[in-house]
Image (cartoon, rainbow, N blue to C red):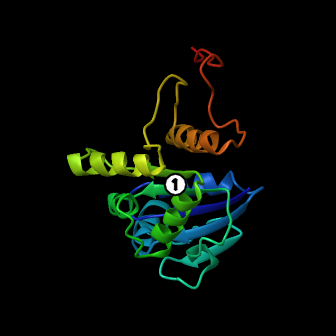
């Protein structure tokens, strides 16, 4: 698959890193916003690298991703800040992330938004509704407990696994319902 992955300034950089680690068999075009870099340094440190095939600055409108003639299979914004969600919901393509998302919606490609915010305001919820009505898939970074996660990494894997499920990419990041085994005593 040819995928576009965008990382914005919401907390959740480990989600983006884990997703990219699981997309190594795919062509990945990565965009990281300026605000995301501040969060990345805080959550993952200065030395982190994000595996991808191509990377772009969020202000690079000369990138092929800025054009709807650039064909890709799906786009994921992980984590998706409320600012980026609002821009996507309202068609405000002021950077490469929101422009690529607009292209995904125009072309009917899956656009997976992974908001990582709590609590949510009514405006946030309305923006999610508007983005959903435009064709986006809203996949909040909400953990589940039925698979009995014991570490933060297992909670991260659950959310990333759900993203991979939406993309139709096989994985073994979490145990599905019916595959759950009891915890050892």
How dense is the environment of label 1, judged by Cα within 10 Å: few (below 14), some, or many (20 and up)? some
Quadrant position of the N terminus in the picture: bottom right
Taking depth in this image into account, of 176 and 72 the one nearest to the observer is: 72
Q: How many marks?
A: 1
* Residue 86 position in % (x across, y down): 33, 60
Q: Quadrant of residue 118?
A: top left
Please give the name of the residue rendered at 58% of the width and 57% of the height, measured from the top-left corner: 17
The residue sitting at 78% across, 55% down in the picture is: 25
Position of residue 150 relative to residue 64, above or below, is: above
Q: Left or right? Give the position of 111 relative to 169.
A: left
Residue drawn at 75 percent across, 58 percent down: 26
* Residue 161 sits in quarter: top right
Q: Which of 22 and 85 lies nearest the eye of the viewer?
A: 85
Residue 145 shown left or right of residue 127 in the figure: right
Which residue is at the front of the view, 173 or 137? 137
Q: Secondary structure at mark 1?
A: helix
Up the image or down, 11 lies above or below 157; here it is below
Q: Residue at x 63, y 78 (%)?
A: 64
Is residue 115 visible to the viewer in this orientation of the structure?
no
Q: Looking at the picture, how far across and down is residue 178, in whole percent?
A: 63, 16
Residue indicated by mark 1: 14
Q: Residue pushed farthest right?
A: 25
Residue closest to the far bottom = 62
């Amino acid at each position: 698959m040819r995928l576009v992955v965008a990382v914005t300034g919401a907390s959740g950089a480990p989600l983006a890193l884990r997703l990219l680690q699981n997309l190594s068999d795919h062509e990945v075009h990565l965009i990281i916003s300026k605000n995301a870099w501040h969060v990345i340094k805080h959550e993952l440190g200065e030395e982190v690298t994000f595996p991808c095939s191509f990377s772009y600055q969020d202000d690079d409108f000369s990138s092929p991703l800025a054009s709807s003639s650039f064909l890709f299979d799906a786009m994921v914004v992980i984590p998706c800040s409320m600012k980026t969600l609002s821009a996507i919901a309202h068609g405000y393509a002021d950077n490469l992330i929101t422009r690529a998302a607009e292209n995904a919606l125009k072309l009917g490609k899956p656009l997976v938004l992974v908001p990582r915010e709590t609590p949510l305001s009514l405006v946030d919820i309305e923006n999610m509704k508007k983005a959903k009505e435009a064709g986006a898939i809203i996949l909040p970074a909400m953990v589940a407990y039925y698979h009995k996660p014991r570490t933060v990494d297992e909670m991260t894997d659950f959310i990333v696994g759900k993203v991979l499920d939406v993309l139709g990419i096989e994985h073994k990041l979490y145990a599905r319902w019916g595959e759950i085994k009891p915890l050892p005593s």
